[in-house]
Image (cartoon, grey):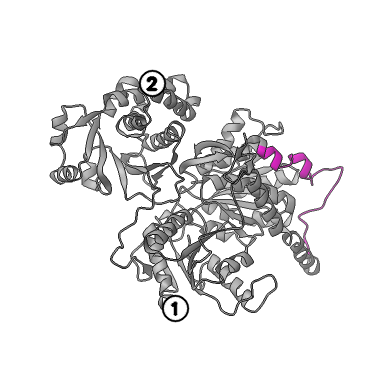
C-alpha cells in the first residue's frame, strides 16, 4: 500500500509496520530472496540461522517458488565453503555468523571474492577473544576480514539491517563482489524495535530472480576453470585484473541506495550526515551507538547551543573517502569513535582511513575537495565487548574536541582509565535523551523466568495496540539461568534513537525483595513512578512491612505507586507442565503492565479490547508451540491484569 509524504511524494512501498529485532528483520529478507543458507551456530548470530532453518522446516519457498534449503556443517569454515560451492553452482545463498566464526572463515572469504561470487553474509558483529572470551558487540571480527575484498555495510538498527540486506544483495550481484551485512551483536540482533519490513512485492521488484542474474559455473555443458594454481606472472596479472570489478562498485552501490530510498522513502547512502551544515565539531562512527550520538547531538544543540554534527559511515567498503572529506572539510575538529582497539597501530581502522582521505585531499588528488588545512583529528575506543556507550560519553568527546590540539588525540570512553574521557562542568549529570512523551521500564529478574520474552511481547503489544514506537532489549551477560538479569523497554510517540541502558525510567519490575540486596532497583525511577513487586500473596500491609526502610523513604519521598502480584501461584495454577512453571512467570507481567500504566486509560480501551490484541502478540511468539501453550499464556496475562493489587505506603 502506497503512502504520501509531506511534500506530496508518493511512496510505493512504505513497509509493513511491525516490531522485530535485527535477527528477525534479516531472516525475513533472506527467506524471501535466497534459495539456500549454510551456517554454523555462534552467538549472537544464531537466531538468524534458526529463523531460516525454521522456514525450511515449514516448507517455505522464496518469492520465485524455489524451496529453501539449509546446511549446518561442522564448523564456520565449512559453512563458508558450502556457500562457495552453492554460489559456484548458481544458487543465491547466505550465511549468518559472528566473532571467531567469521575469522575462521577468512581463508574462504578470499576465494569467494577471488572467484567473483556475489554472496551476502549477515554478521552479528562480536568482540574477539583476546585476553578473555566475550560474546557481545565489537567490531574486531569484521575489521579482521576487511582486507578480503568484500563490501561492508554497517546497520545502526533493525530497519537498516533489513534494508541493507537487500542493497548488499543487489549490489553484489550487479558488481560480482560479495558483501558483509553487519549489525551489532545483541545491541541490534536482539533489540526489538518498531520497524517496517520490506514488502515481498518490493523485494521481487528490487531484485532479479536468481536464475536470471546468477551463473552456474559448475555446468558441464559450459565448463569453466577456477581455483587454479598460478606462478608469479599469471598470479599478479590475475590479481591486478580484479581491480576492474571494484572500480564501478561505489557507483553501483550509490545507485542502489538511491533506488531503494525512492521506493521506500527511507533515505540511505554511503554516509549519513546529521546537522553538519554549520557544525564546528563532528562525531564519526559506525553501528548502533551512532543512534545515541544522534540524540546527544540534538541535546547539545538544544541545551548548550553547541554546533555539533555527526557522520554515520554506512559503507565501510567501498570506503566513501571523498564524501567524508567533503562533509568534514569546514569543521575545527573531528572525533572518530570505534568499537575496537587496535593498540599496536597509530589509530583504529576507520580513523586511519579518514586520515588517509584527508592526506589525499591535501595534496590535491582528483575527486577530493581542495583543502589548505585539515581539522584536528581525535580518535577513540568505546563499547568494547558490548560495553554501554552513553550520551555522557559523547558529551565528553565533544568537550575533548573543543580543546582542539590540547585535547587527547587518542582516548577511550566508558571506563576508568588514564586515557578515558569523562564529562566536565557543572551540568555533567547524565542527560535524558529519550523522545518527549516516552515511558520507560526497567525489569530486575532472574534468568530463565521468561522476563526477556515478556519484554518483547510488551513492546509488540504497545506498538500494535497503542500505535507507539517501541524498543525492548535485555542486558545480556555470560551468566546462565538462575542468575540476575536486567531488561529495558521504552515506548514513545516518536522514533526512539538511542542504544543505551536506561538511567531514567517510569516503571520498575522487581522479581523479589532480595533485589534490594544486590542492586539499587529504585535508582532512576521518576517521581510519581510505578514499582511492581513479584511476591507471595499476602495482605498488602504485610508486603509494605517487608520493604527496607531506605526503600520506604525513597518511595514516599518520590510518591511512587507500589503494586504486588503473586506470579508463582498464578502460573502453578494455570500451567500443567512443571518445567514451564518458572519460565512463564514473566508473562503475567504483561497483564500487570496493561493494568498499571496509563496507556490503555488514556485511550479508553477496555479490558476486552486489550486482551484481543494481547492474543495476537502471544500467538506471534508462541503460536507454533501449540494451542495449549497459547491458551495458558493468555490465562496468565488475564490473571495478572485482574489480580495485581496496589500496596498502601502510608
Classed neighbour count for the residue bearing mark 2: other residues with Cα under 10 Å, few (<14), some (14–19), many (≥20): few
Q: Quadrant of residue 14?
A: top right
Question: Would you identify the image quadrant in which residue 72 lies?
Answer: top right
Residue 500 or 440: which is nearer the viewer? Answer: 440
Q: Secondary structure at mark 1?
A: helix
Q: Quadrant of the C terminus?
A: top left
Residue at 79% over, 44% down? 216
Residue under numbered circle 2: 608
Is 229 a magenta residue?
Answer: yes
Within 10 Å of disc 1 (Cα), the crowding (few <14, some 14-19, many 20+) is some
Cα distance in 3D space between marks 2 and 1:
63 Å
Where is residue 82, by image quadrant?
Answer: top right
Instruction: Give x and y (percent) for residue 521.
Output: 25, 45
Mark 2 or 1: in front is 2
Image location of residue 101, percent across then percent down: 55, 51
Q: Is disc 2 in contact with disc 1, using a CB cutoff of under 8 Å?
A: no
Tell me if 583 is positioned left or right of 104 in this view: left
Tell me: residue 600, above or below residue 83: above
Residue 299, which numbered label? Answer: none
Residue displayed at 42% across by 65% down: 306
Pick the residue in front: 624 or 394.
394
> Which residue is tagged 1?
405
Tell me residue 342's x, y (percent).
49, 67
Q: Residue at x 28, y 28 (%)?
A: 568
Q: Is residue 302 visible?
A: yes
The numbered mark, 2 or 1, whose residue comes first in the sequence reads 1
* Residue 26, horizontal then vertical, whole percent: 57, 42
Q: Quadrant of the N terminus?
A: top right
Q: Which residues are magenta?
A: 202-230
Residue located farthest toward the right when viewing the structure as drawn: 221
Amino acid at each position: 500500500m502506497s503512502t504520501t509524504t509531506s511534500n506530496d511524494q508518493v511512496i510505493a512501498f512504505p513497509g509493513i509496520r511491525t516490531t522485530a529485532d535485527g535477527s528477525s528483520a534479516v531472516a525475513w529478507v533472506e527467506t524471501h530472496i535466497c534459495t539456500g543458507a549454510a551456517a554454523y551456530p555462534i552467538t549472537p548470530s544464531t537466531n538468524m540461522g534458526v529463523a531460516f532453518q525454521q522456514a525450511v522446516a515449514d516448507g517455505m519457498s522464496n518469492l520465485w517458488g524455489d524451496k529453501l534449503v539449509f546446511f549446518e556443517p561442522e564448523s564456520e569454515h565449512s559453512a563458508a565453503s558450502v556457500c562457495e560451492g552453492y554460489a559456484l553452482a548458481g544458487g543465491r545463498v547466505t550465511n549468518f555468523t559472528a566473532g571467531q566464526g567469521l575469522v575462521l572463515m577468512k581463508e574462504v572469504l578470499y576465494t569467494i571474492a577471488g572467484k567473483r561470487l556475489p554472496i551476502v553474509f549477515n554478521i552479528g558483529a562480536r568482540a574477539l577473544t583476546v585476553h578473555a572470551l566475550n560474546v557481545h558487540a565489537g567490531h574486531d571480527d569484521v575489521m579482521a576480514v576487511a582486507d578480503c575484498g568484500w563490501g561492508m555495510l554497517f546497520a545502526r538498527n533493525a530497519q537498516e539491517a533489513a534494508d541493507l540486506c537487500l542493497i548488499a544483495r543487489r549490489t553484489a550481484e550487479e558488481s560480482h563482489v560479495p558483501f558483509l551485512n553487519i549489525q551489532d551483536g545483541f545491541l541490534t540482533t536482539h533489540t526489538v524495535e518498531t520497524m517496517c519490513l520490506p514488502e515481498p512485492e518490493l523485494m521481487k521488484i528490487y531484485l532479479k530472480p536468481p536464475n536470471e542474474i546468477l551463473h552456474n559455473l559448475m555446468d558441464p555443458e559450459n565448463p569453466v576453470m577456477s581455483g587454479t594454481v598460478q606462478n608469479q606472472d599469471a598470479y599478479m596479472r590475475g590479481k591486478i585484473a580484479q581491480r576492474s570489478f571494484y572500480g564501478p562498485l561505489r557507483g553501483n552501490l550509490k545507485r542502489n541506495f538511491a533506488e531503494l530510498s525512492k521506493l521506500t522513502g527511507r533515505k540511505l547512502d554511503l554516509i549519513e550526515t546529521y546537522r553538519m551544515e554549520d557544525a564546528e565539531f563532528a562525531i564519526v562512527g559506525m553501528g548502533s551507538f551512532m543512534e545515541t550520538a544522534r540524540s546527544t547531538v540534538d541535546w547539545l544543540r538544544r541545551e548548550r547551543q553547541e554546533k555539533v554534527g555527526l557522520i554515520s559511515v554506512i559503507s565501510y567498503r567501498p570506503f566513501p573517502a571523498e564524501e567524508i572529506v567533503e562533509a568534514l572539510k569546514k569543521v575545527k575538529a573531528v572525533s572518530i569513535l570505534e568499537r575496537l582497539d587496535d593498540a599496536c597501530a597509530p589509530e583504529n581502522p576507520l580513523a586511519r582511513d579518514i586520515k588517509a582521505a584527508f592526506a589525499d585531499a591535501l595534496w590535491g588528488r582528483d575527486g577530493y575537495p581542495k583543502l589548505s588545512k585539515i581539522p584536528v583529528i581525535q580518535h577513540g575506543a568505546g563499547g568494547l565487548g558490548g560495553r554501554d556507550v552513553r550520551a555522557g560519553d559523547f558529551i565528553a568527546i565533544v568537550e575533548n574536541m573543543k580543546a582542539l590540539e590540547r585535547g587527547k588525540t587518542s582516548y577511550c570512553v566508558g571506563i576508568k582509565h588514564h586515557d578515558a574521557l569523562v564529562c566536565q562542568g557543572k551540568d555533567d549529570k547524565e542527560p535524558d535523551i529519550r523522545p518527549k512523551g516516552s515511558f520507560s521500564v526497567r525489569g530486575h529478574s532472574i534468568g530463565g523466568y521468561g522476563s526477556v520474552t515478556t519484554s518483547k511481547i510488551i513492546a509488540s503489544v504497545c506498538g500494535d495496540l497503542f500505535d507507539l514506537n517501541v524498543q525492548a532489549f535485555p542486558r545480556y551477560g555470560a551468566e546462565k539461568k538462575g542468575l540476575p538479569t536486567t531488561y529495558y523497554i521504552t515506548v514513545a510517540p516518536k522514533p526512539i534513537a538511542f542504544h543505551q541502558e536506561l538511567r531514567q525510567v517510569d516503571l520498575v519490575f522487581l522479581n523479589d525483595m532480595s533485589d534490594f540486596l544486590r542492586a539499587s532497583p529504585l535508582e532512576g525511577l521518576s517521581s510519581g513512578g510505578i514499582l511492581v513487586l513479584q511476591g507471595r500473596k499476602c495482605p498488602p500491609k504485610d508486603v509494605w512491612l517487608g520493604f527496607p526502610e531506605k526503600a520506604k523513604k525513597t518511595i514516599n519521598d518520590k510518591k511512587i505507586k507500589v503494586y504486588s502480584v503473586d506470579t508463582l501461584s498464578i502460573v502453578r495454577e494455570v500451567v500443567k507442565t512443571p518445567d514451564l512453571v518458572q519460565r512463564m512467570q514473566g508473562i503475567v507481567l504483561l497483564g500487570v503492565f496493561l493494568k498499571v500504566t496509563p496507556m490503555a486509560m488514556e485511550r479508553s480501551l477496555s479490558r476486552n479490547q486489550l486482551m484481543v490484541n494481547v492474543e495476537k502478540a502471544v500467538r506471534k511468539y508462541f503460536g507454533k508451540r501449540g494451542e495449549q501453550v497459547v491458551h495458558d499464556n493468555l490465562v496468565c496475562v488475564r490473571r495478572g491484569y485482574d489480580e495485581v493489587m496496589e500496596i498502601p505506603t502510608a
